[in-house]
């Protein structure tokens, strides 16, 4: 092997990071995801604006968000179990079709002047219910579209969608609301969702063996017990949980930092958000371009520790240029280690349990509002810096604690037998 091949350049690494797009099915999946997530981001803005127009009540905004979150949290375990018992592609298409019809329904109600708050609440509840079945199937479908060696690329490239839509979706919705109103904005959401469906209909995958030998409740508990008994999975998913509940709420408190502590107003707040989004996009791509898949668990633990330390510095920074730089690096580091965790799970999960485990993993992000409430309560009595600092200490502390554990999983590879899950090695380590 030549020196050039042994040590590829940065440009070659970046090209290799896009290798998953060579696969026809994954390209269809990726562009469908792009339209679907764009519609989802636009929906959040349009729905919030509509509720505010109808009620002028911040409480109503919170209740609407709760109406969406509750069914997602309570039904995700069922959704994950069904994803392991049925055709994941069909579930994904059916869920997206239902979402598109829901957007079209609310658009008609707005344009005809019949819209009422209870309509919005009901549709938010339906949207959350659909998401509980949709997300596990989407996450579990990925390994059916690319070979194992391209899974890290596919996970990272898929993560870029969320960062791109985080930057573009709210701005597009806000502009549409300003130009044509809320009703047409929901029509745009519906068209984007139907575009995703049309792309996904062209996907052709081989359906894995279905797990239908037991009842649904038993099937759900099998997934929970698998996570509980295997150190690799509960360690990595615990890191995601801590990031969601204790780390990411700094984004919720960002307006307080911009207005009261850094004194840069709404314009400065916008730049802080943009810097974080740009950093997150780069961090997501970096996993595929520059990470070592054999050491991803350890890299994730190191990333969590670094994120916590940087977040602690951000909490007490009063210099806007420093805070702006930290916002960029925080976005990059957090997405690096979260994408690394997602990659490890996708590489090592047994196929028969993929929907259930990835469903639970995705559920941790729905708990971010819980972290927001905790951080908000601390900030109310002790200030925003103290609230962010507490979360930073928790995240960094967990990263340090799991680092020795994560180092034992270096070089972990999926065994040939699906029944002998990779976490059997983790269980052996846990017993030592």
Image (cartoon, rainbow, N blue to C red):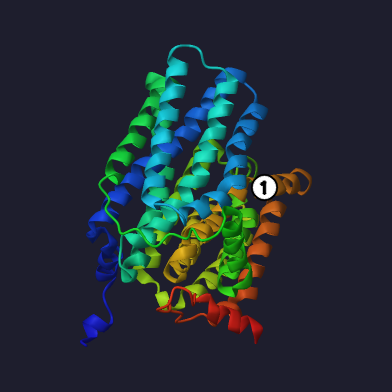
Q: Residue at x 36, y 50 (%)?
A: 89
Can residue 51 be seen in the rendering of this structure?
A: yes
Q: Nearer the viewer, residue 396 or 73?
A: 73
Q: Residue at x 51, y 73 (%)?
A: 297
Question: Can you name the residue that lies furthest to the right here?
Answer: 381
Which quadrant of the view contains residue 227?
bottom right
Q: Residue at x 62, y 46 (%)?
A: 74
Taking 182 as reference, is 6 above or below it? below
x%, y% of residue 313? 61, 61
Q: Secondary structure at mark 1?
A: helix
Taking 307 as reference, is 191 above or below it? above
From the viewer's perspective, is 303 left or right of 198?
right
Residue on which the image places disc 1: 370
Which quadrant of the view contains residue 181?
top left
Quadrant for the C terminus in the image: bottom right
Question: Can you name the residue that lies furthest to the front here?
Answer: 213
From the viewer's perspective, is 169 left or right of 356?
left
Q: Nearer the viewer, residue 384 or 242?
A: 242
Q: Nearer the viewer, residue 178 or 315?
A: 178
């Amino acid at each position: 092997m030549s020196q050039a091949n042994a040590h590829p350049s940065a440009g070659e690494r970046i090209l290799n990071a896009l290798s998953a797009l060579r696969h026809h099915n994954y390209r269809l999946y990726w562009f469908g995801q792009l339209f679907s997530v764009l519609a989802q981001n636009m929906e959040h803005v349009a729905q919030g604006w509509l509720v505010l127009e109808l009620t002028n009540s911040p409480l109503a905004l919170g209740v609407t968000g709760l109406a969406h979150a509750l069914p997602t949290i309570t039904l995700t375990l069922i959704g994950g179990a069904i994803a392991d018992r049925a055709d994941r592609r069909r579930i994904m298409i059916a869920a997206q079709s239902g979402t598109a019809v829901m957007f079209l329904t609310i658009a008609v109600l707005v344009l005809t002047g019949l819209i009422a708050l209870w309509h919005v609440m009901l549709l938010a509840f339906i949207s959350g219910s659909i998401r509980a079945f949709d997300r596990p199937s989407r996450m579990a479908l990925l390994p059916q579209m690319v070979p194992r060696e391209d899974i890290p690329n596919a996970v990272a490239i898929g993560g870029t969608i969320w960062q791109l839509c985080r930057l573009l979706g709210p701005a597009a919705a806000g502009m549409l609301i300003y130009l044509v109103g809320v009703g047409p904005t929901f029509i745009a959401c519906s068209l984007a969702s139907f575009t995703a469906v049309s792309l996904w209909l062209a996907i052709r995958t081989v359906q894995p063996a279905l797990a239908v030998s037991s009842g649904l409740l038993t099937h759900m508990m099998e997934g929970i017990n698998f996570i509980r008994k295997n150190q690799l999975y509960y360690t990595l998913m615990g890191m995601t949980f801590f990031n969601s509940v204790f780390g990411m709420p700094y984004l919720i408190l960002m307006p307080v930092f911009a207005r009261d502590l850094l004194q840069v107003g709404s314009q400065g707040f916008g730049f802080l958000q943009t810097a974080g989004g740009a950093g997150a996009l780069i961090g997501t791509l970096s996993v595929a371009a520059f990470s070592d898949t054999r050491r991803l668990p350890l890299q994730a633990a190191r990333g969590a520790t670094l994120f916590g330390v940087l977040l602690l510095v951000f909490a007490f920074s009063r210099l806007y240029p420093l805070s702006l730089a930290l916002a960029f690096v925080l976005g990059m580091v957090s997405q690096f280690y979260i994408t690394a965790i997602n990659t490890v799970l996708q590489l090592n999960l047994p196929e028969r349990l993929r929907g259930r485990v990835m469903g639970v993993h995705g559920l941790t992000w729905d708990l971010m509002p819980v972290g927001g409430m905790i951080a908000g309560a601390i900030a109310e009595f002790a200030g925003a810096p103290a609230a962010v600092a507490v979360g930073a200490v928790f995240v960094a502390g967990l990263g340090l604690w799991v680092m020795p554990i994560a180092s034992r999983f270096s070089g972990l590879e999926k065994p040939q037998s699906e029944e002998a899950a990779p976490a059997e090695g983790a269980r052996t380590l846990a017993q030592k």
